[in-house]
Amino acid sequence: MEKNSKFKNSIEQRKKNMRLFKRFTPYLLRHKGEIALDLFCASMTTVCELALPLIVREITDAAIEDIASLTVKRILSIAAFYIFLRIVDAIANYYMTCGGHVMGSKIETEMRNDLFSHLQGLSFSFYDNTKVGQLMSRLTSDLFDVTEFAHHFPEEVLIAIIKIIGCFIIFAEMNIWFTLVIFAMFPLILIMTKRNRQKMRDTFKSSRHQIGEINAITEDSLLGIRVVQSYANEPIEKKKFDIGSLRFLSLKKASYKYMANFHTTVRLFDGFMYIVVLAGGAMFMVAGQISPADLTAYLLMVSTLMGTIRRIVEFSEQFSKGMTGIERFDEVISELSEIKDMPDAKELSDVKGEISFKDVSFKYEGTDSNVLTSINFTAKAGESIALVGPSGGGKTTLCNLIPRFYEANSGEILIDGTDIKKYTLKSLRSHIGVVQQDVYMFSGTVKENIAYGKPEARDEEIIEAAKNAGAHDFICQLPDGYDTYVGERGVKLSGGQKQRISIARVFLKDPEILILDEATSALDNESERLVQQSLERLAKGRTTFTIAHRLTTIKNASHILVLTENGIAEQGSHSQLIKKGGIYADMYALYSI
């Protein structure tokens, strides 16, 4: 039963390796010319290495049979030929060391770029269940070993093939039976090291995962450093980090244990092989089946061959690291976004702004109950729609469905009478502006953050957008004006300032559809007043969805939807809902107290 399980695991591992090679091969093939030159150089270094035992054998034979034949001219000719070989070897090795590593770095860079591009296209649901620290690890450290793997793998395979075949031919020419005895030993080393190779690969993968965990802990703690220090919880964060570090240390210890077992086995086998060749060769020589020159060549050639076998076995460590990096790359690159363009998707243009929800339901992945159930309403072009209701009622979720940050489980969402799934994502989102409660500022200048709404914008357009957002005056008072560095996540700006910059960003984008997700809830009264004025200017003439907990800010909305866990409980204008005396009226009365 255990043998069947091991056999099955071996088959599964081979299948996995083949799949990973298939994923990696296209990156190699992009550099066919460089690989070909690298392999040519590898073959040259191998040929040069194999030549030395043959040269020694020739000199030894001549010395034993006819010492007079070793003239100065012949010795100098042999020396000159060997020097030529060493020069060729040096040039070839230089390219392998420099050009090969550069090629590997190019492949690493291409894989990292592809992975980053792929991550940019994954939906919100993927990020809901994934730690950013883990993704950072896969983008950086996981791909470091791919550089080595990318060029060493084809090199080592070719060198091994040439040396093994070359040594076998040379050995067989001297004595086939002794050659078969020597080569019969090599499968033993592969069998003896197989278990440790697999253990090493497993621990390398676990180590990579744990590095991602440490990255996640570090990112979480440092980004929340103000909260950590305000609660004096530095010891708690230190403890979490220590636990992660100790876990990583234990994995490193295990990997070094398997590595030590691995290398010790190789060294023991190395010594055993020399004993076999020396003792066996001596007996064959006594029997008159090989000459002293042959034995000398055998010893030198076996040294070369053992170096090759040692490199193959030791490359297993690098192979395991490289395959682990490719495997973790493959795990993310294989993630498919459920939100993507349909084959016949068209560009959204000439937007009027009418938005209709038709029997829309939605639930988050991994949950059983709907957040939204059978939502039906229409927002006419230019209307202001306010969403109110208790937390968990689905207000933000409903708004996130419009730009397809999430995909509705059932029903349709229409813009100007066409299902949003029939539009390309890029064109759909280019006509929608979002102002959130938690404003994200990119590390850079004020100007760069505003220009994010329209990267090609001129300075005049950026300034005009800032004026419309009520941000121009305070920006001019900053140390470097629009070129002021805002700090990590805009830490050098107040909440109101960040919010007005985010509004300027949307003004610059100039979308026909606007989503305001509790954009003033975290502000003080004065900042809220200023931001609210900016939002009113921004919403003018646009179809606007406003999520608000301060009900006075949405009294003038064209239409108010009261969302609960059961769907739309009430809808109408402010005056209509107050007269109705239902949920909205109770909420408004409570707010007014």
Image (cartoon, rainbow, N blue to C red):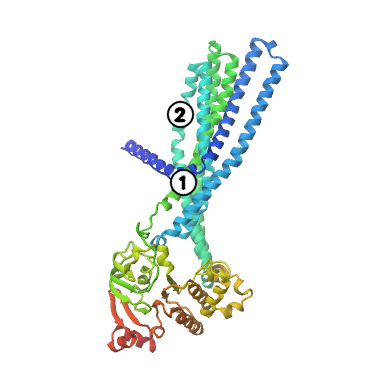
Q: Nearer the viewer, residue 247 or 121?
A: 121
Instruction: Give above or below for 557 relative to 311.
Output: below
Task: Tell me if I can see residue 171 in this picture.
Answer: yes
Q: Amino acid at mark 1?
A: Thr
Q: Secondary structure at mark 2?
A: helix
Q: Label for residue 324? A: 1
Mark 2 crowdedness (10 Å alpha carbons): few <14, some 14-19, many ≥20: few
User: Is 328 on the left-hand or right-hand side of 493?
Assistant: left
Mark 1 crowdedness (10 Å alpha carbons): few <14, some 14-19, many ≥20: many
Taking the spot 34% from the left edge, 36% from the top edge, the residue there is 3
Q: Position of residue 247 (x, y in %)?
A: 48, 53
Q: Amino acid at mark 2?
A: Leu
Q: CA distance from mark 1 to mark 2?
A: 26 Å
Instruction: Give above or below for 156 relative to 52.
Output: below
User: Is 168 on the left-hand or right-hand side of 479?
Assistant: left
Q: Residue reaching furthest right?
A: 72
Q: Position of residue 133 (x, y in %)?
A: 48, 58
Q: Secondary structure at mark 1?
A: helix
Taking the spot 42% from the left edge, 70% from the top edge, the residue there is 431
Q: Position of residue 159 (x, y in %)?
A: 53, 32
From the image, tell me which residue sits under label 2.
188
Taking the spot 57% from the left edge, 67% from the top edge, the residue there is 444
Q: Residue reaching furthest front?
A: 350
Instruction: Give above or below for 109 relative to 384.
Output: above
Q: Nearer the viewer, residue 390 or 231?
A: 390
Q: Decide which of tag 1 and tag 2 comes sooner along the chain.
A: 2
Q: Position of residue 410 (x, y in %)?
A: 28, 65
Quarter the N terminus occupies: top left
